[in-house]
Amino acid sequence: MTASDLPGSGRGASVGARVVRPDGAHAPRTPRDDRRGPGDPQDRHGDVTVDEVALSAELAGGEGRAESADVAEYALWLGDDALILSQQLGAWIARAPELEEDVALGNIALDLLGHARSFLRYAGTYDGRSEDDLAYWRDEPGFRCAWLFQQPNGDFAQTIARQLTASTYLFELYTALQGSSDETLAAIAAKAVKEVEYHRDHAVQWTLRLAGGTDESRRRMVRAVGDVWPYVGELFRDEPLTDRLDGVAVRPSSLQPRFDAVIAAVFAEAAIELPAGPMSSAGGRHGSHFPALGYLLAEMQVLARQHPGVTW
Amino acid sequence: MLRQAQQPVVAAQRPVVAAQRPAAAAQRPAGAAQRPAVAAQRPAVAERAWAVAASVLDPEVPVLTIEDLGVLRDVAVDGDRVTVTITPTYSGCPAMDAIRDDVVLALTAAGFADVEVRLVLAPAWTTDWMTDAGKHKLVEYGIAPPSGRAAVDGPIRLQLSVRCPRCGSLDTREIARFGSTSCKALYECRACLEPFDHFKVH
């Protein structure tokens, strides 16, 4: 089967199917590598072919089809949050303050991409779209990510402030979502919760370090917390969809007390004051987005759209 | 052309087949240190298929088999068809495609023509499934194995000492929370001054 046989011809480039491993250059040589002869196409770099990619099913979490448009829409929300945050963090690779942070942020991005693939694949089961259709062929108004995840990387402190709030929220969300009556959502959440717990830990460590570091690092950390804070409110806003999906979706407002308690503990230790001031009216769940999202999508989607069906 | 499962399944939804372990994966208590045990009543052919699949090495930590890692969850034989169930360590683990291909290659080389590899997320993988033999292999390879179980609670973690795989000292420190693969962190030993990888408790 070739790309031209596919519905929506050529939408076959895979999200993350050929993720660059953060450790790729240093991976130990294995017997698997030894089996490859010089003529093995996998040994060559730079080959670009246009054909169908068998998407990895590893992260799917279930063979079931999303049972309603509402469930699919909810999976889309969660998948978009993870996808956009993953794409943002990828931009730090080779630009972080130290090599270890390149690796750390790359690893976190990889976990998030895994979550995104699971959720988006599940979302697509309802109407027959693939994870690639959803990632590469929706325009900005079709995305449903919350504004926190769309906030620019900024300086390292801003990325850490975004990571702290995002991973604290995601940890509480996935903890609760494990109890969803939807088996696929529960399975993805049970897998993801352990990973975002580690992401949260990473962000907490950096928050403490920057807040307790030099005058400059503290100034930047405090400013960064203030900059991302207006976008926290959207995460806990109940929506008609989450009301309708009682038992399947997690009610956003139910997550706020635990989120507040964790943030309060971290801020107390870091001696950071909880920012006051109004929350943004952010409307990511309805397709109204922060100005930065369009540019991010342009970069993320350009390859798949310029060269439909490309693999590498 | 390799046969690959296009539609993975949640373990709990799988129909129970005679050749499978008596305890379906999903029925295991969460957090219990269990891994697939070969059932006494497993037919000889399923036994052999398990042994072949269990010999596949992890591409990123090549001293460990996928059985040692706890990635191999089930091997079922139904007539000519072998169905192997594996689970990813981390959600974005890039080694899963290689492992899947290697399982197919190993089983076809052993004479099983019809091989299907299924990937399941539930129950979620934990380092508690790593075998003791696997942990010993890691130490010999120079990687500190996971020990104990990480408590998922509270934003400030309690950090236990990690024993240096080279000199055995507990006087070690974490250099980086993320290492060469998703499953490892980077440490150094303050006694022998060697850096080493630590397979994180997960």
Image: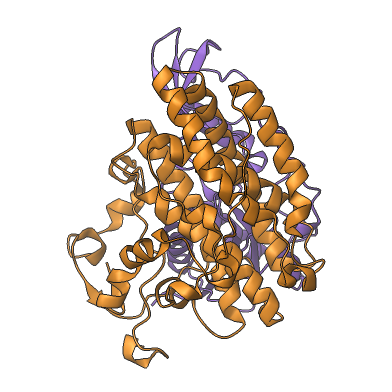
Quadrant showing the N terminus of chain B:
bottom left
The answer to whether residue B188 is left or right of residue A180 is left
Q: Looking at the picture, does residue B170 appear above or below residue A227?
A: above
Residue B150 visible (yes or no): no
Q: In which quarter of the image is residue A283?
A: bottom right
Q: Looking at the picture, does residue A149 appear above or below residue B161?
A: below
Q: Which residue is drawn at 34% across and 37% down?
A: A96
Q: Which residue is drawn at 35% across and 42% down?
A: A23
**Front position in the image: A140 or B109:** A140
Q: Quadrant of residue A247?
A: bottom right
Q: Quadrant of residue A239?
A: bottom right
**Front position in the image: A225 or B162:** A225
Colour in which chain A is drawn: orange
Quadrant showing the C terminus of chain B:
top right
**Front position in the image: B148 or A165:** A165
**Front position in the image: B117 or B89:** B89
Residue A21's spot in the image, x, y percent?
36, 49
Q: Looking at the picture, does residue B21 appear above or below residue B60?
A: below
Residue A148's spot in the image, x, y percent?
53, 52
Colour in which chain B is drawn: purple
The answer to whether residue B194 is left or right of residue B122 is left
View extreme (front): residue: A277
Residue B116's spot in the image, x, y percent?
54, 72
